Amino acid sequence: MAASLRDVASRAGVSVRTVSNVISGAGPVAPATRERVQRVLDELQYRPNLAARQLRGGRTGVVGLVVPELTSAYFAELAGLVVDAARERGWTVLVEQSGGTAEGERQLLDDTERRGLDGLLVSPWSLAPEEVLRRVGGRPLVVLGERDPAGLADHVTVDNVAAARAATAHLIGMGRRRVAAVGLQPHLTNATAAHRLDGYRLALSEAGMRPDSDLEIAVSTLHRDEGVRAMETLLARPTPPDAVFCFSDGLALGALRTILRRGLRVPDDVAVVGFDDIEDGRYAVPSLTTVTPDKPQIAARALQCLADRLGTAASAAAQRIVVPHRLTVRESTAGLT
């Protein structure tokens, strides 16, 4: 017979309410108590009765995560971290990809009520946060990324301007004077590329250097093939760059391949920096210097926002949380060791 909440509470020496708080992640529980209850939950292989939970409290224990694409290593890694962190709360995550289009985002958000989701984490590329909020039907919402909801919903993001500035300053500090930027996306409204471009130009200005439109390359996606195309364009210039800041690691990996195929050396002839710190970049040859956002903290803080909204902070003011980042220096700027 399946274990009940009362069985778990009895063995853990706590109240049924405490067990419920541990499972939902929505109530205050001391860390030691939470650990003890979770250990008993695991021992008894407790599985929540989602139908009964919904009837009792309007909760299913299921939250949604909507990202633009799962073919992107960054979003795939983030989705895995969200699933792992949610499991610790006893939650299930329904992961969907919108394609980054307004139509795709509307379709998934309009489906929220039918799917019985308790709350949503959404990384919108096309819809304004106001429309996202309207379409989720009053359910708790956390916006991920650069579409600032202006206090209408909780927001978890990275300081892309500061991160891009640090990446570009690192290249300039190496003595590079023709630093290219690969990743402009004027066709999108999500502001990620715009903020990274701002940081890139700010670092140039602080070094007394002027932006050069020939060194700023637009792309249709942040994937490897666009990095290849962009680098081929740059190397065809009369005076090619001696450093490249790519707005994603995917772009950087494509750029690396093109540079090496041309018989050039990295970082001697062209130094390369990416953004996102995906796993492939750590094992590339040369390994990739990159901006490392704290992805585990993005997942944890976003889920905590949902838990707060489902608990005692349902009507509290929306939070804007900026998670840390760092520049991780590897062989594409430091050379082989």
Image (cartoon, rainbow, N blue to C red):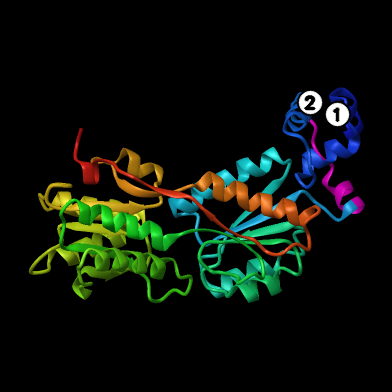
Residue 136 part of the magenta-drawn span: no
Kind of residue at disc 2: Val
Residue underneath mark 2: 40
Would residue 160 be visible to someone looking at this image? yes
Residue at the (56%, 69%) spot, across then down:
148
The magenta region covers 44-56
228 vs 25: above or below: below
Residue underneath mark 1: 8
Q: Quadrant of the C terminus?
A: top left
Q: Quadrant of the N terminus?
A: top right
Kind of residue at disc 1: Val
Q: Secondary structure at mark 2?
A: helix
Disc 2 to disc 1: CB gap under 8 Å: yes
Left or right side of 146 for 142: right
Residue at the (79%, 26%) spot, across then down:
40
Residue at the (64%, 75%) spot, across then down:
130
- Residue 182 percent location from the top left of the image: 29, 64
Q: Quadrant of residue 238?
A: bottom left
Residue at the (19%, 57%) spot, across then down:
243
81 vs 137: above or below: above
Left or right side of 147 for 308: right
C-alpha distance separating marks 2 and 1: 6 Å
Left or right side of 314 for 252: left
184 vs 248: above or below: below
Mark 2 vs 1, N-terminal side:
1
Q: Quadrant of residue 236?
A: bottom left
Q: Secondary structure at mark 1?
A: helix
